[in-house]
C-alpha cells in the first residue's frame, strides 16, 4: 500500500479484522428472519440515529459529495443537505405512524406495507422498484470502495470493483442486520471523527484556511446554481421523496423500540448528516486548491495521500471504509429482503421456514452484488448511479405511499397502476436519454415525467375505479 506507514496499515487491518469478527458474532446471535432483517425490533434512539446516518452517509455519498465539491464547489451541498432536510421532514411527519403500523403487521419490508393497503400486485411492483433502486445504491458503494482502493493500491478500477463487491457481500451475507446494528454506532462515530474532526481540519489548514480558498477558486465555486437550478432542485426533490419510499427508511422504523425512539433517532441522524455534509464541502474545496489537476472519483484519495500526515491516513481510510461498509450492507440487505420476503415467501413458497429464508437471503445478497458490480463497471460516475437509484425509488412510489398513510381514498387498481406505469415511464426516459442524447424531450429529468404519470394515473384511477369490498377491508385493517 503505497504512501501508508506501518501504523496506517495496522489501523486498517485491525478495523477489517474487527468487522469480520463482528460478522461472525452476529451469525451466532441471529435466530430468525426478524433478527436478520430488522434486528429484533428493539433498538434505541441512539442506535437508530447512527444506523440512519451510517446508511445514508455511505462511501458513495462521502466520496461523491467531495468530488462534486471538488468539481463544482458549494453547490454539491444540494446532495447531502437534501438528506439532512429529508430526515427532519420524515421524522416529523411519518416515523411514528410507520413504526406503529409496522409493529401491528409485524412487517419486515416496505412492499409488505404497500400490499396491506393496495393488494398483492402492488407489493410485487413495489418490490421490483425497490430491488432495482437498491441494486443501483449498492453499485454506488462498490464504486466508492473501488475508488478508495485505486487511490491506495494503484490497481485497475474494474479489479477494485470486484474486490469491493466480494468483501461487502461476504460481510453482509454472514452477519445480516445484527452485524449492521452492532457496528452502526461504531461506524457512525468513525465517519464523523475521521471526516469532520480529522480530514476536513487538516486539509483546510493545508489549503491556507477559508480566506485562501476563497481567493484561489473562481466565484462559480461559491454559487449554488453552478450545478444548474433544474438539476439541483430535481435532486433535492428526488432525495426528499425517497425518504418516504425507501425501504431502508421503513426498516429503521420497524427496528425501533417504539414510535418515540424512531422519531428521535431520525432527528439525531439529521444532525450527524449535516456535520458530514459540511465536512464534505470543506474537503472538496481544500482538495481543489491543494491538487487542482486530480481527476475523477480519486481526488479525495489524491489529496489525502499527498497532504495528510502518516499515521492519520489509516484513520481516514477506515472512516471511509466504515461509511462504505455500513451503507453497502444495508443496501444489500434491502434488495435481499425483496427477493426472499416480497417475492419468494409471498408468491412462491408461503410456508418457507425461517432458516431457509435466512439462507436464501445470503444467496440473494450474492446475486445483488453481481448485478451491482456490473452496473458499477458500466457507469463509473458515483452521483450519476445514485441519482438513478433515487429517481427509480421515488417517482412511482411517493404518491401512492403518501396517500396510503394520509387518506382512505384510492384502492388496489389506482395504486398498482400508478406504481407500474410510473416505473415504466422512468425506465423509458432513461433509455430515451441513451437512444436520443440530443433530444430536448429526454433532457428533462426523469423524476418529473415519472411523478406526473404517477399522480395522473392515481387520481384518475380514484375517480373511475370506486373502492370495492376488498379495498374497504384492507383500508379498515390498515387504519384500524
Image (cartoon, rainbow, N blue to C red):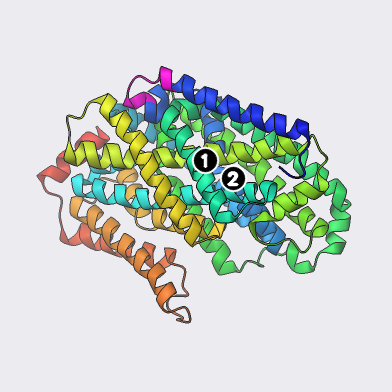
Relative to residue 449, is residue 274 drawn left or right? right
Q: Position of residue 123 (x, y in %)?
A: 25, 46
Q: Position of residue 150 (x, y in %)?
A: 64, 51
Q: Position of residue 34 (x, y in %)?
A: 34, 26
Q: Secondary structure at mark 2?
A: helix
Pointer 2 local density, CA inside 10 Å: few below 14, some 14–19, many at least 20: many
Establish if 272 lies above or below 415: above
Determine the residue positioned at 27% across, 58% down: 420
Determine the residue positioned at 23% across, 39% down: 344
Pointer 1 local density, CA inside 10 Å: few below 14, some 14–19, many at least 20: many
Question: Disc 2 marks which residue?
Answer: 59
Determine the residue positioned at 36% across, 34% down: 362
In this picture, which residue range is highlighted in magenta? 27-35
Establish if 39 lies above or below 156: above
Of the image marks 1 and 2, the number of the one nearer the N terminus: 2
Tell me the quarter of the picture where residue 19 sits: top right
Label count reads 2
Q: Position of residue 202 (x, y in %)?
A: 82, 43
Question: Disc 1 marks which residue?
Answer: 327
What quarter of the picture does the N terminus occupy? top right
Residue 413 covered by magenta stretch: no
Tell me the quarter of the picture where residue 113 sits: top left
Determine the residue positioned at 77% across, 47% down: 305
Res. 129 visible in picture: yes
The reply to whether dot 1 and dot 2 touch (C-beta < 8 Å) is: yes
Q: Secondary structure at mark 1?
A: helix
Amino acid at each position: 500500500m503505497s504512501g501508508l506507514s506501518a501504523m496506517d496499515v495496522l489501523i486498517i487491518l485491525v478495523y477489517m479484522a474487527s468487522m469480520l469478527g463482528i460478522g461472525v458474532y452476529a451469525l451466532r446471535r441471529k435466530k430468525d428472519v426478524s433478527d436478520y432483517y430488522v434486528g429484533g425490533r428493539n433498538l434505541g434512539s441512539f442506535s437508530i440515529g447512527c444506523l440512519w446516518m451510517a446508511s445514508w452517509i455511505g462511501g458513495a455519498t462521502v466520496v461523491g459529495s467531495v468530488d462534486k465539491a471538488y468539481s463544482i464547489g458549494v453547490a454539491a451541498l444540494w446532495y447531502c443537505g437534501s438528506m439532512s432536510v429529508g430526515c427532519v421532514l420524515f421524522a416529523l411527519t411519518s416515523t411514528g405512524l410507520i413504526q406503529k403500523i409496522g409493529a401491528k403487521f409485524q412487517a419486515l419490508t416496505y412492499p409488505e406495507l404497500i400490499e396491506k393497503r393496495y393488494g398483492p400486485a402492488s407489493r410485487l411492483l413495489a418490490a421490483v422498484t425497490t430491488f432495482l433502486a437498491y441494486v443501483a445504491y449498492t453499485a454506488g458503494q462498490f464504486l466508492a470502495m473501488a475508488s478508495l482502493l485505486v487511490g491506495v493500491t494503484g490497481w485497475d478500477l474494474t479489479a477494485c470493483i470486484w474486490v469491493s463487491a466480494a468483501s461487502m457481500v461476504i460481510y453482509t451475507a454472514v452477519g445480516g442486520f445484527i452485524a449492521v446494528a452492532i457496528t452502526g454506532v461504531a461506524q457512525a462515530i468513525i465517519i464523523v471523527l475521521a471526516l469532520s474532526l480529522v480530514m476536513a481540519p487538516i486539509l483546510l489548514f493545508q489549503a491556507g484556511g477559508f480566506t485562501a480558498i476563497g481567493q484561489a477558486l473562481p466565484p462559480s465555486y461559491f454559487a449554488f446554481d453552478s450545478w444548474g437550478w433544474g438539476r439541483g432542485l430535481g435532486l433535492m426533490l428526488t432525495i426528499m421523496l425517497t425518504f418516504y419510499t425507501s425501504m431502508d427508511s421503513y426498516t429503521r422504523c420497524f427496528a425501533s423500540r417504539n414510535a418515540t425512539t424512531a422519531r428521535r433517532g431520525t432527528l439525531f441522524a439529521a444532525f450527524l448528516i449535516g456535520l458530514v455534509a459540511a465536512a464534505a464541502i470543506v474537503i472538496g474545496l481544500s482538495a481543489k486548491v491543494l491538487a487542482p489537476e486530480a481527476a475523477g472519483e480519486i481526488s479525495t484519495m489524491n489529496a489525502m495521500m499527498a497532504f495528510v500526515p502518516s499515521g492519520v491516513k489509516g484513520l481516514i481510510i477506515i472512516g471511509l471504509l466504515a461509511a462504505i461498509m455500513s451503507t453497502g450492507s444495508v443496501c444489500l440487505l434491502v434488495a435481499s429482503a425483496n427477493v426472499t420476503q416480497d417475492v419468494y415467501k409471498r408468491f412462491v413458497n408461503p410456508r418457507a421456514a425461517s432458516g431457509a429464508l435466512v439462507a436464501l437471503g445470503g444467496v440473494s445478497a450474492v446475486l445483488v452484488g453481481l448485478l451491482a458490480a456490473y452496473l458499477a463497471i458500466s457507469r463509473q460516475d458515483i452521483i450519476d448511479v445514485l441519482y438513478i437509484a433515487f429517481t427509480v425509488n421515488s417517482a412511482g412510489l411517493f404518491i401512492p405511499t403518501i396517500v396510503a398513510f394520509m387518506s382512505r381514498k384510492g384502492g388496489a387498481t389506482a395504486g398498482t397502476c400508478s406504481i407500474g406505469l410510473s416505473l415504466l415511464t422512468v425506465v423509458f426516459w432513461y433509455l430515451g436519454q441513451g437512444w436520443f442524447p440530443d433530444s430536448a424531450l429526454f433532457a428533462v429529468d426523469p423524476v418529473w415525467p415519472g411523478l406526473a404519470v404517477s399522480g395522473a394515473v392515481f387520481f384518475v384511477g380514484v375517480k373511475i375505479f370506486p373502492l370495492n369490498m376488498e379495498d374497504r377491508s384492507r383500508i379498515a385493517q390498515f387504519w384500524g
